[in-house]
Image (spheres, rainbow, N blue to C red):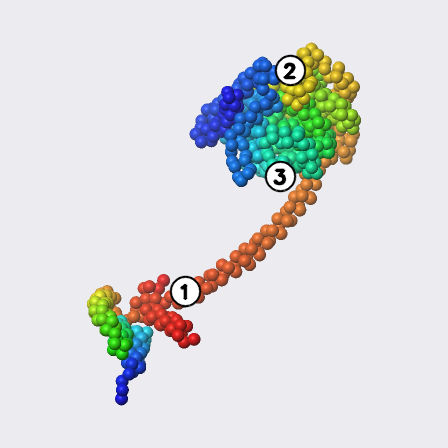
Amino acid sequence: MHVGLEHYLAVSALLFCLGLLGVVLRRNLLVMYMSLELMLNAANLVLVAFSRFNHNLNGQVLVFFIITVAAAEVAVGLALIVALCRKRQTAHVEDLTTMKL
Amino acid sequence: MIYALLTWLILFLPLFAAAGITLFTLRWRTLSALLSIGAIVIGFILTVALTLSVHLGTPNYWTSTESITNWLTIGNLSVDFGLKLDRLSLMMMLIVTGVGGAIHIYSFGYMHADRGFSRFFACLSLFTFSMLGIVLANNFLMMFIFWELVGVSSYLLIGFWYEKPSAADAAKKAFFTNRLGDFGFLLGILVAWSMLHSLSFTTLQQTLAANPAALGTAASIAGLLIFCGAMGKSAQFPLHVWLPDAMEGPTPVSALIHAATMVAAGVYMLCRTLFLFNATALHIIAYIGVFTALLAALIAVQQNDIKRILAYSTLSQLGYMVMAVGLAGPTPAMFHLTTHAFFKALLFLGAGSVIHALNEEQDIWKMGGLCKKMGITFWTFLVGTLALSGVPPFSGFYSKDSILAQALEQKNYPLFTLGAAVAGLTTFYMFRLFYVAFVGKPRTEAAGHAHESPAVMTGPLIVLAVFAVIGGIIPISEIYLSQFDAQKSAIPLVQRIIEPFTASPVGALIGIAFVAVGFLAARILYQNAATDPLPAKLGGLATAMKNRFYFDEIYEATFIRAHDSIAAVFDFIDRWVVDWFCLGLVRGGTDFSGRALRLMQTGNLQTYAFLFVLGVAAVLWFVLGR
């Protein structure tokens, strides 16, 4: 079977939707955060696929940047979540509604 | 140059006094009074100096000067703020500062016990400033501004005792009635401006002199509209109702504003702008004047409040002046205005002295026998009464006779007859007042214990009495003559004393005959009267007179009622249509949508994320899917 661009795009879309569902439906902050990473990587996959099929390396370079930034973002985000858990003794998103008036 | 400077100084001194009192010296009563009195007395001295330098200098050295500064320019309309100094305004300034000064000094005694002493003097000074502004104005707009300022200061002074509901109501009534007239005045000014493209009196006069038909068909309308202003200020029928009520103010105010100066502003304005009026307008003005004179004189016959009698007599005399203007005789009008300022201020101040002595008692039937208790007040009041009645050789005789002579000269016999009859009525009601209040026995305890007022009050009385006597003999009318009619030459003193008899013997003799009849009738009816004998003799007519011919009631039932119902309709529209329907709907809609949108802010991260995704999906569908 020949693996074409469509297959990559389909996998990527699947991953993205899984991530989205995770963010919207799961209640645990850490799980939501992992789902977020999943969506990010779905986007990376699309970039790499397009890069490969269009013979253009710009996409791959962009992916490296995204991975680097995502690593930094994870460091900050996890730190925030840990701080929040210490303060509130919960990682449950429904308990964090202080933004409501 | 020095004239211009002095004139500006005279105009603004009272304003400085008013501002100074209001801002700094309200706590120091005497200082406030001195500031105010000082301003007007200095003004008077400067005015006298100006007059002497004019009169003693070469006679025709200057007849009129104007000092003008440009005030505002809008498009091609340029308005000056200028002072017009000529014989007319100079004489009027003498009256305002002279009579006004006497009244200021008198107020120092009369108002001494009042809590608002400083405020009173601040208002008096503001009034003096506004009145001088009217007198000196060289264009219609400036005159109108000061005209309104006079209205405001009159409102403040009538409502001086604002705790009294009657005083507050009278102040409102005066202000509204004046505003009604001023509306016409403003329209008249606009008509004149739109036709002649100028507001300056000098320019207007030149334009009309060059082309008498410049106003075209609007001439009568413009004249009558401008007369509306005078109708309000000078309290002519049908806007006469405010003046008697204005007597709720302190007596010096009645003397200053509602007898000597402010009510004269209308007549002064008519004389100043006489060139605008055509024959038709003047004819109507003359008849309104004589009708007011007659009406007010009839009402005065049956009033019992000493100040109201004087108020109606003021109305009646103003009617005379307006009639004189209507007969194209500004000289007699201004002459009568001047003498009237002397003797009416005198009468009011005399009445104030009586009221003061009797602990605020104003009903003449509760007085009596005051001639022995209050010598100076009695004699000066007698002088005022004789002058007002027009007994020779008091000042009122000369000025009243000059008006009657003017009517004869114009061959207007109906006006002459009515005018002479009013002179008789005037004598009758004044001597009724005189006999009841001053002669006979005291009718009440208070009248028995009355005592003479202090010198600060009797002093002005004596000064004014002197002028009420000699006002007709000193060359007042000459100065007005030289202003309005340059051809007539001056006459020597001796000839001036007998002038009424030589110039127009018929008029003078008929006038004196009516005065004699009025005096005799008053003497017979009231010399020893315990109660008023007239109601029994006249029946319904006396009741009508006593009730001021029901003008207030008629106005109440028609204009005020109509006004109230229109106001009620608009109140309904405002309350229910605008407030409830329009505003309520908008407010309610906003409130409702706000409440609905608030539900979307849950504070839950996942809701936001979900909405976010929905939004992205919608955008994607919008961009790609359609």
Q: Where does the image place residue B557, in percent across and percent down from the top left?
A: 69, 44
Circles 2, 1 touching at the beta carbon (< 8 Å): no
The picture places residue B434, in percent across and down from the top left corner, at 68, 22
Same chain assignment for discs 2 and 1: yes
Q: Which mark is residue B485?
A: none
Q: Dot 1 falls on which chain?
A: B
Q: For the point 72% across and 25% down, which residue is it?
A: B426
Left or right of B477, for residue A11: left
Q: Residue at x 58, y 17 (%)?
A: B61
Judge the density around disc 2: few (<14), some (14-19), many (≥20) Cα neighbours within 10 Å.
Answer: some
Q: Which residue is the site of mark 2? A: B474
Compared to residue B85, the image places residue B161 above or below, namely below
Is B609 placed left or right of B111 in the picture? left
Q: Position of residue B468 (x, y in %)?
A: 64, 18
- Please state the horizontal and vertical placement of residue B567, each as a whole percent of the image: 62, 48
Mark 3 highlights which residue? B194
| Mark 1–mark 3 distance (CA, rounded to whole Å) | 60 Å
Q: Earlier in the sequence, mark 2 or mark 1?
A: 2
